[in-house]
Amino acid sequence: MIDDAFAPAARAIADKRIPGATLGVVTADGRRWTKTDGMAALQPEPEILTPEHWFDLASVSKVIATTTMILQLADWGKIDLDAPLTTAIPDLRQYDVANAAERKLTFRDCLAHRSFFPAVEPIYTYGDDPARLRAFVLQREWRHVDPPVYSDINFILLGIAIERITGRPLGEWALNAELSFGPPPGPAVATEFCHWRGRVLKGEVHDENCAAMGGQTGHAGLFGTVNGVLDYAQGLLDGSGASPAMIEAMRTPYYDHRTCGWERKFAGWSGGQACSRETIGHTGFTGTGLWVDFELGLAWTLLTNRVHPTRHFDSGIFVLRPETGDAVAKAFG
């Protein structure tokens, strides 16, 4: 079954669109399949990809780490999801208290990207002092975008809120085994040749803003193996990794097709159309993704290094992901 589900990725590797890929599938009762092929790195030295390799999960960090942390804090009564961020970050836009729209945004607004922030900004070009860049994010008057778009800034703010509430960096939060804010403790998959840093990135975070802010932020920075990601997904399927209230928040639409942190199935989305309507998912820029189908009791993760050695190439990832989702549903559903 796993060979059939892996077929789209195998074709992408054979066509040299992506260097390598790992596909993992898990069921609510703990059955698990993985398949790995291709290269962990092409340069500076070739390296064969194995199931033990750690991937830069990129924006999948938003759901596995940040969303889970925020919902856990809400579960503990530390925050109200519908309260403004200023309950945790009172100095947000502190020089414009009367007029700043940012001060009215709630935790739930940011989780569901129901804000007005631009999609992404080159924060790293303003310096590389993590504390100063956090202050910059909090005090900047961001240009407003309407209608709302998916924005990294939402989750950078949520990460700062977690740091303020707990008094600890994100990397000290207890995570499943084989999930970690970088650098990872095992062999790492290469991502891009970064012109800013002047080298191929391997075992260090790909996202420039996250790197400049210290490598542990709400929007990126998490590394994981295929089994680390599957352990997290199984915890959602069997309820061992999150409370019923947390899982309900992850599954319930809040704005358009977005829930607290996740996307639900919609026409043309990354998880394909063969999954049930009760499927949530999220992708990462480096070529990663995780999808959880609660109706089928099935989850899958596709981990690739599609930005290696450069993002400026048509890897076909936006076709590969839904093709893989449909192949998984056909093989295992």
Image: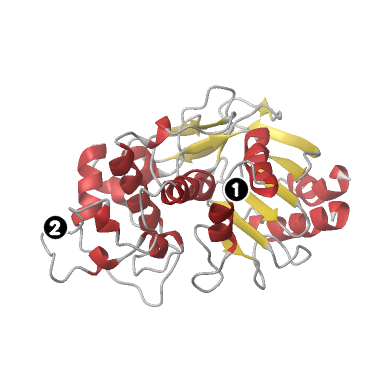
Using the image as rendered, state which of residue 64 and residue 272 is in the foreground.
64
> Position of 233 compared to 126: left or right?
right
Please name which of the two marks, 1 or 2, marks the residue nearer to the observer. 2
Query: Residue tagged by mark 1?
Result: 287
Number of dots carrying numbers: 2
Using the image as rendered, state which of residue 222 and residue 109 is in the foreground.
109
| Image x and y of residue 108, in percent | 41, 62
Q: Are marks 1 and 2 in contact (CB under 8 Å)?
A: no
SS class, disc 1: loop
The residue sitting at 19% across, 68% down in the picture is: 100
> Quadrant location of the N terminus?
top right
The residue sitting at 79% across, 45% down in the picture is: 10
| Image x and y of residue 88, in percent | 27, 51
Q: Few, some or many C-alpha atoms within 10 Å of disc 2 (few <14, some 14-19, many ≥20)? A: some
The residue sitting at 27% across, 67% down in the picture is: 104
Q: Amino acid type of disc 2? A: Gln
Mark 1 vs mark 2: which is more N-terminal?
2
| Image x and y of residue 193, in percent | 48, 38
Query: Residue tagged by mark 2?
Result: 94
Asked if residue 142 shows in the view, the reply is no
